[in-house]
Image (cartoon, rainbow, N blue to C red):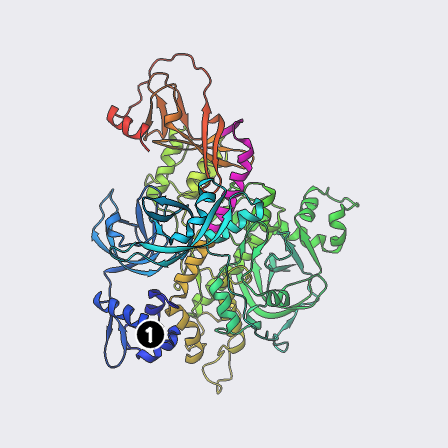
Amino acid sequence: MKFTVADLLDQLDSTEPLPLPRLEKALGASGRSDKRELRIGLDALARLSIVAESEEGVLRQGTPDLIPARLRCSSKGFCFALREDGGEDIYIRDQQLNHAWNGDRVLVRITREGGRRRSAEGCVLCILERNTSRLLAQVERREERLVAVPLDDRLHTLVELPQQDAVHLEACESGEAVVEVGIDHYPVAQLATRGHVVRSLPVNGGEPGDLELLLTKHQLHERPAAPRASLKTPDKGRREDLTALPTVLLRPWGDSEAPGLPALSLEERQEGGWRLWVHAPAVAERLGLGGSLDLWSRQRAEAIGTGAGWLPLLPAPLAKAAGFSPGESQAAVSVALEIGAEGELEHYRFCLSQLRPDGCADGNALEALAERKPRSRTLAAPLKPLKEQLPLLEGLVALTERLRQRRLQAGSIDLDLPVPPLERLGDLRVPAPDGAGKGWLEELPLHHPSAVLREAVLLAHRALGRHMAGLGLPAIYSVNPAAEPADLNEVAKAALSLEIPLELSADGNASAADLAVAFAGTDRRRALQQQLRDTLQGEQLQEEPGPNAVAGEPQALAAWTCPGLHYADLWNQQLLVTLLVEGKDRPTVRHKTSVDLSTDACHGAIDWNVFAPSLLATFQEPLRRGLLQRLNLRRRAAAEFRDDVVAMAQARHAEPLVGQTLPGCISGIQSYGFFVEVPPSQVEGLVHVSSLKDDWYEYRSRQNRLVGRKSRRTYMMGDPVEVEIQKVDALRHQIDLAVIQPDLPATEEDGDEAETGAEAEENGRGD
């Protein structure tokens, strides 16, 4: 089927019926089989009272009791529906899933309201969009059936295979290969899932083989080629000539195919402060909104680093045409940010520009700049090509620290949790300048290219967010609410149990920023920062402006400077270019006085629509048809893929170490054991409580520790331990560890509160 239920519903309106022929055309249902499938879908949705049909057409019904959500299941069988509106998660029992799988978009009806300590419960009424059309599996014989068992144990299903796929049994049973399985029929009522083996993939195929496994797992290995389309030429008549302005490129990534990033310029103002210029590659002017290239990039949504390279967002000809190179004149979309002496954003002005970057500084150049002694006449080799740009680079680094301190004071959080320094991870070791949608930013050295770019980019995004919100234009806003106080208090309790001094607010709650500062000065900082990281919410893309805690922005943030990284940036750049080129700067042509739509000075001076109705509709229509939901899903999927690439690299690094004893650090405590991180790859493995043979260990949930009943031996978060790597399952990213226990002298029993024997038996030995 060419379309999903979500695609169908996105075409419908709740106020005006859509004629059936127009619906068929919008969904591309031209053949008889497509129309038949559409009819089946409409009949089913009508029975659920989600749509209604009449002679005028199809109308979407108002269903406030149905909640759109995405399923998140665990390997233990627990499933929750993550609401798209940001509300509390809904627990879905197995019998209420109605054949929905992990990652599927669904409509959920609440069957039982939540309580103080209990999540609301619900049932899946309709599957909007399947997340899994292909999966990695092992072929097994179950009685008389040939089935595929998914490697992802969050998919609680078996896939029935035709008997001819039995040729893959031997390779799967020996552990030499896994298979890619295509789903032919999803489960319906009593009918099981059916599929077929698409191909066999080796388990030990080296780095290229691992990448192919992960691309297949995340369904990224068969992406459609870019359509053939001519690129538009940016209009030179409207551009501001900035070719004489000293400008520098910062290159944090080493891959030649890495997405293009903004260029920076800096001027000191006579009245004090600075004028920081951020120049974004002019991508939006080269492709039209809604054109074939735009829709192709919209479908991809994100540029994704693979370690070995990149899965690009933009077609190669477009990325090359818009990219910056030292000494070459190039079109850009720029913003001049007026910054006060304390690092505050005072005013801003956007423009279409023409610039000529003077040089390019990578990590080696900025590291040499950091090591350079003041007034030194000699230059290190990486700095010699940048001799004329050294004052500019030094000024940018100095301003970066002011902007960073101001951002942290506004509640933003930097955590020292870098990606492991494994060579095979390539550019994934370097964070994106915009934070990549996480609820926190990686702590970086002051002279790191991403550190300098980050502060400039976030400030430019704050400016556009405020500008679009002030003009009421349909931007895509990045919203990042503060973490839930209850979740932060749990982290604070864990810290207090480790005797970490904390200062709580007057209401007894802890703030994420205060916790980050408190943890940074302790010897258990990494373990505590990981706990804090897990409570922070990632950025969400939405139509309405809102606060963004990551950037320390209380009003609105709209990303636009990295159109080669995220489609949301490209959308907002298209909106900005349209405003600068076609925006109405006066009510009618008869008015002689106009306003400058490129600056914040126009706010409050406009009482007319700056876009014509037809022009505004071109931006509003995709948003109405579910664009943001799809972009948010693609962003989460890209993050999951990147996490899997890192986990696979860590597991492969650990495989040769099986049987060796290594130092590690406890990163988490659970009733069934504790997790240990082993440097330098920071691979995390589990020491199961059943492997602790010296004693019976009780889980003290209040103190967040495991304690031996007789020996009083204690395992706490952040404790250094020695472990032996016993088993590595690279495909599932599972590492089994055994702790090396030194002899302890006998000690008197302490008076800490212990759990009952029944609770200890359930929590200490059960998994």
Q: Is residue 647 magenta?
A: yes
Q: Is residue 231 magenta?
A: no
* Residue drawn at 27 percent across, 78 percent down: 57
Residue 93 seen from this side? no
User: Horizontally, is 321 left or right of 718 in the view?
Assistant: right
Is 337 situated above or below 122?
Answer: below
- Judged from the image, the secondary structure of the residue bearing numbered disc 1 is helix
Instruction: Using the image as rendered, state which of residue 3 and residue 582 is in the foreground.
Output: 3
View extreme (right): residue: 377
Crowding near the residue tagged with mark 1, few <14, some 14–19, many ≥20 C-alpha atoms within 10 Å: some
- Label the magenta part by its dominant secondary structure: helix
Instruction: Using the image as rendered, state which of residue 170 and residue 635 is in the foreground.
Output: 170
* Residue drawn at 37 percent across, 74 percent down: 29
Kind of residue at disc 1: Lys
- Quarter of the picture containing the C terminus is top left
Residue 192's spot in the image, x, y percent? 30, 54
Tag count: 1
Residue 233's spot in the image, x, y percent? 61, 75
Image quadrant of residue 686?
top left
User: Horizontally, is 568 left or right of 183 in the view?
Assistant: right
Residue 488's spot in the image, x, y percent? 37, 41
Q: Which residues are magenta?
A: 641-664
Is 515 situated above or below 711?
Answer: below
Is 586 situated above or below 422?
Answer: below
Q: Which residue is mark 1?
A: 35
- Quarter of the picture containing the N terminus is bottom left
